[in-house]
DNA sequence: CTAACTGCAAACGTTTTGCAACTTT
DNA sequence: AAAGTTGCAAAACGTTTGCAGTTAG
């Protein structure tokens, strides 16, 4: 996983995508760059907007295609917390999330700060894909 | 919370709805009945279908209105696990869920079988709404 | 009579799809 | 030329909304 900073050069990101088995087209590079230079919880719509701030460069179809590809290749992961839309998280290390039901905002919970213990036996013939904890919060004392 | 069995009479459910501050119209009674006589993880679409098996009785708008009302009154709760749709769960006791990413099926995890410890400090000015654990599983050994 | 409730159809927002055009090798 | 990729527009899907009509106290 790349560190999250504005300091990655295009060449660096390009090389990283290649290493992950992703052909680094200019659109994929644009999308990868937004993930590794700012806030790491982004919806498809967020990315579409961020990638097209200056000029129109990436279509919506390509944003969705690319996000699916990145998820498949393990570069990012989906966060299912908001009933209305999927978030994508470029932090693939084990961690959990606060979800603010009033604002729709996500925030990280370090995996050191919250432990899940006593994982029960999985249903027969099933393999573990992941354990997601969402701590829902609302405005109030 | 009512037990989940087919044995509840209409009068019983009607009385229970009244006790929860819900005016028991015939549509709400129909919807409440499907929740307490079978599988407890249902999507809005599931309920629409179940309630209209014999004859057309409840519109989609009313299904959604009623589900929102039931959630607001605490009779049922939403489960956000499937990226495509919301599930409604008539089991309002603390518990968690398996989610099968291949089939889209939900299954309960008893709260005795999985513990969350070390809940971190909430963001400033926020109150806890709930802690949801989703154990994602897929087909495979 | 009034307030609460319902149903229809249209609208909405997110995501997916079909397909033709464009790259890249 | 073949394979991979992109963009557009349309479609699909779950959900919400506006509003007119109905029902119940």
Image: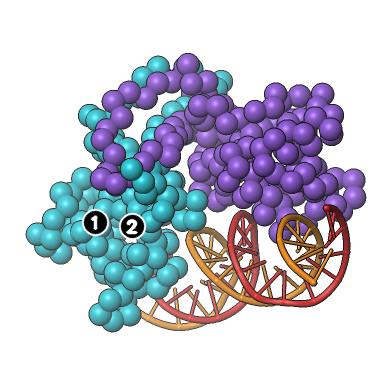
Chain colours: A purple, B cyan, C red, D orange
Residue A88 position (above or below residue C9): above
- Subunit of label 2: B
Circle on res. B42: 2
Q: Residue furthest right?
A: A55
Please tell me which residue lies in front, B116 or A15.
Answer: A15
Q: Secondary structure at mark 2?
A: strand
The residue located at (87%, 53%) in the rendering is A56
Label count reads 2
* x and y percentages locating residue A108 in the rendered image: 56, 26
Disc 1 residue crowd, few under 14, some 14–19, many 20+, Cα 10 Å: few
The residue located at (65%, 28%) in the rendering is A1
Quarter holding residue C12: bottom right
Please tell me which residue lies in front, D23 or B93.
Answer: B93
Circle on res. B122: none
Direction from residue B133 to residue B21 in the image, left or right: left
The residue located at (36%, 68%) in the rendering is B48
Q: Secondary structure at mark 1?
A: loop
Name the residue beneath numbered marker 1.
B39
- Subunit of label 1: B
The residue located at (80%, 30%) in the rendering is A12
* x and y percentages locating residue B21 in the rendered image: 29, 50
Q: Are marks 2 and 1 on the same chain?
A: yes
* x and y percentages locating residue B112 in the rendered image: 22, 29
Residue A80 position (above or below residue A139): below
* x and y percentages locating residue B74 in the rendered image: 33, 45
> Disc 2, disc 1: CB below 8 Å?
yes
Q: CA distance from mark 2 to mark 1?
A: 7 Å
Please tell me which residue lies in front, A21 or A27.
Answer: A21
């Amino acid at each position: 996983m790349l560190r999250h900073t504005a300091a990655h050069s295009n060449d660096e990101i390009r090389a990283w995508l290649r290493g992950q088995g992703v052909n680094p087209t200019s659109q994929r590079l644009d999308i990868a760059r937004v993930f590794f230079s700012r806030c790491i919880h982004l919806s498809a719509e967020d990315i579409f907007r961020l990638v097209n701030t200056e000029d129109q460069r990436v279509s919506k179809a390509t944003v969705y295609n690319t996000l699916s590809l990145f998820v498949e290749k393990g570069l990012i992961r989906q966060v299912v917390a908001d009933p209305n839309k999927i978030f994508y998280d470029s932090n693939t290390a084990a961690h959990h999330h606060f979800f603010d039901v009033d604002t729709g905002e996500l925030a990280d919970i370090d995996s050191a700060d919250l432990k899940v213990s006593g994982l029960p036996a999985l249903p027969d013939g099933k393999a573990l894909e992941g354990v997601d904890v969402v701590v829902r919060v609302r405005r109030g004392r």
